[in-house]
Image (cartoon, helix red, strand yellow):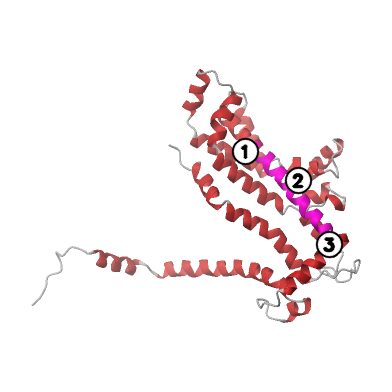
């Protein structure tokens, strides 16, 4: 008995089989490529986490991904704390306070700038937008000399406000805010509010700001990530060790010990490879924690301005 399958309708099972057959070698190649780069990205972080558990000798000769002893973390942390009578705690405090101020100022000013370019009635809005784009293309290194002269004229060299004010200049955040306000808040809302007598300040505080919480979360995250590990600008503007941020302070610590500079024995505190790894964790972990806490808000903020209704 023969069965004619030509006119038979496809079942969901047969559709799934056909879809699997269509998946070629390219699909598997892409997956292998992604897994390869994921492993390459994870291995350095795994080494960084495991390194402080071993002694300096074991770190050089044992398996790089092997675990030493839990007491190794305490030993490396104690050596870091003993450097210059516990100045590490001061550097951590400086980094936290500087970055909190930078995040607050940069997020609010970038949000205001984006709102002004989008909704205000001021002149030369296009020129402001173009200048913002130009500032995004200029590398910060090119502005070091004029910024240093400017801060020197204002008597802010070796003052934390020099780093805070310079780092709060956030052209990318202003452009991101412009895109957000352009695509999420219809111009008709602004016009209706103006007919009711609202000024630009009230438009921002009563309409734009309450609707921009996803944007502010995104601006705060990028400002924090961009400035937490910043080394060059604080190094130029803050010559006194008591004003160092954590990256600048750790750079000075490593240079004055045999960790990176074997010929230098300027300190009796043994700062070696495990201590360097633990210091790297101190810099990396806050960024990871902030990302994990704000992950959902970041995704919401990135998608809010992506679709124009």
Write down the region rendered in magenta: 86-108
Marks 1 and 3, the one that precedes in the sequence: 1
Q: Position of residue 246 (x, y in %)?
A: 77, 55
Question: Mark 2, residues whose alpha carbon is within 10 Å: few (<14), some, or many (≥20)?
Answer: few
Residue on which disc 3 sits: 253
Q: Position of residue 115 (x, y in %)?
A: 58, 32
Q: Position of residue 236 (x, y in %)?
A: 82, 49
Element assignment for label 3? helix
Mark 2 to mark 3 CA distance (whole Å): 27 Å
Question: Mark 1, residues whose alpha carbon is within 10 Å: few (<14), some, or many (≥20)?
Answer: many
Mark 1 to mark 2 CA distance (whole Å): 20 Å
Residue drawn at x 60%, y 34% is 114
Residue on which disc 2 sits: 142
Marks 2 and 3, the one that precedes in the sequence: 2
Contact flag, marks 1 and 3 (Cβ < 8 Å): no
Give me the disc on residue 174. Answer: 1
Contact flag, marks 2 and 3 (Cβ < 8 Å): no
């Amino acid at each position: 008995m023969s069965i004619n399958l030509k006119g038979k309708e496809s079942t969901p099972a047969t559709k799934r089989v056909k879809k699997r057959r269509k998946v070629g070698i390219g699909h598997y190649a892409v997956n292998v490529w992604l897994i390869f780069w994921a492993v390459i990205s994870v291995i350095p972080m795994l080494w960084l986490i495991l390194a402080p558990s071993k002694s300096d000798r074991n770190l050089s000769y044992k398996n790089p991904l092997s675990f030493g002893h839990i007491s190794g973390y305490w030993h490396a942390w104690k050596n870091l704390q003993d450097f210059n009578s516990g100045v590490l705690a001061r550097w951590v405090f400086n980094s936290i306070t500087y970055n909190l101020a930078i995040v607050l100022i940069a997020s609010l000013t970038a949000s205001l700038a984006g709102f002004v370019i989008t909704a205000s009635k001021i002149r030369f809005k296009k020129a402001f937008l173009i200048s913002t784009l130009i500032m995004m293309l200029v590398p910060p290194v090119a502005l070091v000399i004029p910024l240093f002269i400017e801060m020197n004229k204002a008597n802010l060299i070796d003052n934390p406000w020099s780093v805070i004010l310079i780092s709060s200049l956030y052209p990318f955040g202003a452009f991101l805010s412009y895109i957000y306000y352009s695509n999420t808040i219809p111009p008709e809302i602004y016009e209706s509010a103006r007919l009711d007598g609202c000024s630009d300040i009230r438009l921002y505080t009563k309409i734009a700001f309450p609707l921009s919480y996803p944007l502010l979360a995104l601006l705060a995250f990028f400002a924090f990530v961009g400035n937490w590990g910043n080394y060059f600008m604080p190094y130029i503007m803050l010559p006194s060790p008591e004003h160092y941020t954590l990256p600048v302070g750790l750079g000075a610590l490593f240079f004055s010990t045999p960790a990176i500079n074997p010929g230098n024995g300027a300190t009796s505190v043994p700062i070696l490879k495990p201590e360097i790894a633990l210091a790297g964790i101190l810099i990396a972990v806050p960024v990871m924690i902030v990302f994990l806490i704000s992950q959902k808000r970041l995704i919401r903020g990135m998608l809010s301005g992506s679709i124009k209704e």
